[in-house]
Image (tube, helix red, strand yellow):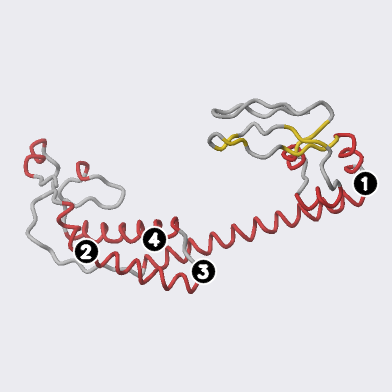
Amino acid sequence: MSAETVRPGREKVVNPAGFLATQDLKERGWTPALIARFLGEHDQTRPNGLRMGRRRLPPVKLYEEARVLEVERQDTFLAAQARAADAREKAERARETRARSREAALLAAAASYTPSIHPEPLRKGAVRKAREPYLAQLEAVAGHLGQQLAQEVGRLGAKDLELLEGLLRERLDLALSSVYPWYPAPGQTATATAPRGSEARPSDWREWDWD
């Protein structure tokens, strides 16, 4: 018998004695396919402790613990459970491999972006004004690279696009910091960046254009 963890907006509901819920079975290594094959229909239900707004979610399916234990002693079940575990591990490894390949492709695509910076007579600390002329180009590059990557690694999700744009922004910031000594390189802040070849003075903030 197991009790559900109590969370905000969730009622405490306890399984009846001698019964296991679907979640209990999953924690014991059961999969939906194994449940359907070896247990079939559930034996009982109980109210669901979760609600979606005012609506309670469907009842939780319960299975007699004695019946579950009997099945878990069968060699055919143990063999099927082992195969299911192997399949899960292979699927997880495949997902991790795809994720690493996708990340490597994003990094390589971002590395191909080399901004060409044209210095302007800007006041020290005018970070936004220094970056602004290149944002439209950066957006266009992100769109173009996104299309290329979609052909190579498949459709990009929102997190992929966010990562790509962040990597491109870092490339732009690095290029700007090599032209403007006061421009913060990636990982730095404007207040922590001193002019090259000299130490920052306490009065420097008066000269910075904090836009």
| Mark closest to the chain's N terminus, 4 or 1 | 1
| Mark closest to the chain's N terminus, 2 or 1 | 1
Q: Position of residue 85 (x, y in %)?
A: 76, 52
Tell me the CA gap for discs 1 and 3. 43 Å
Tell me the CA gap for discs 3 and 2. 28 Å
| Callout 3 amino acid | Gly
Q: Which residue is mark 3?
A: 154
Q: Nearer the viewer, mark 4 or mark 3?
A: 3
* Residue in front for this viewpoint, 168 or 50: 50
Q: Which residue is mark 1?
A: 74
Q: Tell me, yes or no, whether the two marked residues, 3 and 2, touch with CB atoms within 8 Å.
A: no
Mark 4 residue crowding within 10 angstroms, few (<14) / some (14–19) / many (20+): many
| Mark closest to the chain's N terminus, 4 or 3 | 3
Residue 164 disc label: 4
Q: Quadrant of the N terminus?
A: top right
Q: Quadrant of residue 143?
A: bottom left
Element under label 4?
helix
Q: Position of residue 116 (x, y in %)?
A: 22, 69
Residue at image coords 82%, 38%: 63
Residue at image coords 47%, 60%: 157
| Callout 4 amino acid | Leu
Q: Which residue is mark 2?
A: 134
Q: Position of residue 112 (x, y in %)?
A: 35, 70
